[in-house]
Image (cartoon, rainbow, N blue to C red):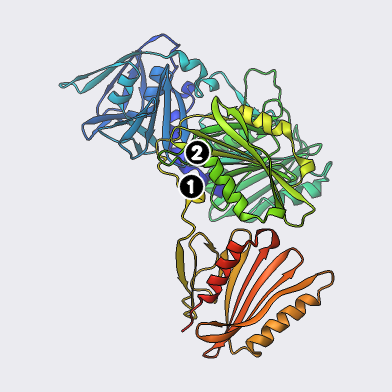
Amino acid sequence: MKAIWKMGLGALLLCQAVLPASAWAQTPEAGQTVQIELTLGQSVLKVNSEELNVEKPYVANGSTLVPLRVITTAFGAVLSWDSETRTVGLKSGNTSLSLQIGSTTAAVNGVQETLEAAPELLNGTTMVPLRFIAEKFGAKVSYDEVTKKITILGTASASAAGNEIDTDLGKTQIGNSYYGWSMKYPAGLIREYQSFQEDLVGFEDADGEFYFSVLAELDATENMSEDALISRLSDETEGRVLKKTYIEEAKQPYALIVTEEDGEVYEYRAYQKADRLYVLSLYVNKAENYNNPVKYSRYKDLLDSFKVSFDGSDRSLKDLSTVKAGYRTYTDETYGYSLKLPAEWLMAKDEDNNIGFLDPKKNKSISVVITSKAEGDKLQPWTDRMLRRYEDMFLPEYRKLEPQRSLTVDGNPAVAVRSKNTFDKKNWDVTENVFLIKGNYKYQIYFNFDKESNVSEMLIQDTLKSFKITRPSSSIGTLRDSEDMDRTQMSVVKNKTYGFQVTLPAHWKQITTADDYALRFGTGYGVLNILAVDDAEVSPQAALNKLKDSIRGQEGVEFREIENKNVTVAGVEAAWSIFETGNTISVVCTFEKNGVSYIVHSVEPNAVFTESLKKQITDAVLSVQVP
């Protein structure tokens, strides 16, 4: 479990600067005059005469850097954080700022400006350029050269009522309404991680002394015995077991396991209510801290407060869940969009790192792909280009395209096209393709259904209605559209082990490394393999015949030979065959040179074995060169 806490270290460093305001100062009300006084090199500052301790302000490249929480407190600014790009977002009134750690480029209401000094992380505190931010938020900054005293005079923004920090004020409990649990508000701790489905949430002590997480599991086996619950808890543990028992006398009985590893202590608890299972994991960095009665009382008080219930009427209870009316909102701060999804859906990434969402049965999915708009590109030509690519990929009898439809998505013109394709002429996949352009980016939203009976018009309409486009992170540059690449470009790939090489389309994806004994490439829906074998026991022709005989011998597999001939590859005679087996077509070429046998084998679905793809495969096979 310790690995959880290391996932979001960047987020932790920012969050240390934005602990709930109640932990160190009372955030002013909207419209209230705010005066902040601080001195370079000193850790004490005043907010409306209230003295506080902060990281010492300092000068970098002629600009004074102050802790970020000075800004959020002074102006009630709404804060956001993109952990992947380490970008801070601040909004006060009608002004939005975006600053990236280590970058001297900032965005003010979407317009880029240059900073004298970049934001920095210092001792776990986010330090930002004071004058730039304060003046953008309408405050006045003065500096006394003699005393090195800085005074900021401004007005708290009306946006403070929606401040993510202020929403924690007055909260004494936290929990998750969707998963049905609650506990004491972990004062002084930082919510370091929360999974997309909210089933796992982790908190970290600012000093790194201890961490704990709550894992919720729906649809667990009901009414597990004490031993079964302990056994299930064992799946989460690591280290040498110090204690393994069941605590019956607790208000909410639980299984308990305590382990130790490398001087670190882990305490695990498992609670059950009906078909819901909850696992609490506590990590303490030093055994002596865990064994210290005073320190352990703090850990125990927190863990003992855990309840397998959530009281929505309790105003002191902060809800960590984003689920409303069965839907959760996914917001992508990096690419600048949000949408609502059924609460039970999963999030995944494809091989190109595009975000996708799946229903639990995995028969429906939604994908969003964002790429840069080429100069002069328009919605309709781009849509037509994408549809031509689709038509070129599938043979006519394996694809269908419905007429294009115009619609509006988040106020932007869009085009929707429904496509269908099959690999067996019986079952048809259905994809609702939605294309739109806003600013410098193209947005493709794909709704995929594994068969026509699973198409949900309501899902499509509700998702498109919820889809909102904001401004992508200022760290985002050009996002090249792989679909627009020149597919006539070729690459030469060499195998280091045997020294053979092949020339093939540059857009094919290499799956194996050059050091392997074989080369393997993804062609789209199929694969191409090139294999070298030392001292083969049979001739290339015999190997090919043996392969075909083994396929013919498989029960229920139809075999149809399309081509069978000899060709020349790498200067020697090679056996060549193309044959169909069920819904796939194989191209196989075998030859021997200098005591090494080579087998080149391509497998493709019938549906995509177009004349164009056949030529690409044929050219690749015939291009093979061996030493």
Q: What element carries label 1?
A: loop
- Compared to residue 200, the image places residue 46 above or below, namely above
Residue at image location 84% in from the left, 69% down from the top: 556
Task: Classify residue 126 by image quadrant.
Answer: top left
Instruction: Residue 47 in the image: state x and y as whole percent.
Output: 36, 16
Is residue 102 shown left or right of residue 363? left
Task: Report whether residue 204 is seen.
Answer: no
Q: Which residue is drawn at 55% across and 29% down?
A: 413
Q: Residues within 10 Å of mark 1 (few under 14, many from 20)?
A: some
Q: In this view, does 621 lie to the left or right of 130?
A: right
Q: In which quarter of the image is residue 183?
A: top right
Contact (Cβ within 8 Å) of mark 1 with mark 2: yes
Give the secondary structure at mark 2.
strand
Q: Where is residue 431 in the image (x, y as percent from the top left)?
A: 67, 43
Which residue bears the numbered disc 2? 442
**For the view shown, which residue lies furthest in the left direction?**
146
Q: Judge by depth and name the residue closer to the eye, 347 or 470.
A: 470
Indicate which disc residue 247 carries: none
Q: Along the line of sight, which residue is nearer the eye, 573 or 457?
A: 573
Residue type at mark 2: give it.
Lys
**Percent x, y for residue 284?**
55, 45
522 displayed left or right of 498: right
| Gap between marks 1 and 2 measured at Cα | 9 Å
Rate crowding at label 2 as few (under 14), some (14 to 19) or many (20 or more) other CA atoms within 10 Å.
Answer: many
Please name the amino acid that badge 1 sits on.
Asp
- Asked if one can make out residue 39 in the rendered structure from this viewpoint, the answer is yes
The foreground one among 508 and 281 is 508
User: N-terminal of the two: label 1 or label 2?
Assistant: 2
Look at mark 1 in the image and give the residue it sits on: 481
Residue 383 at x, y percent in the picture? 55, 40
Q: Is residue 238 above or below residue 545?
A: above
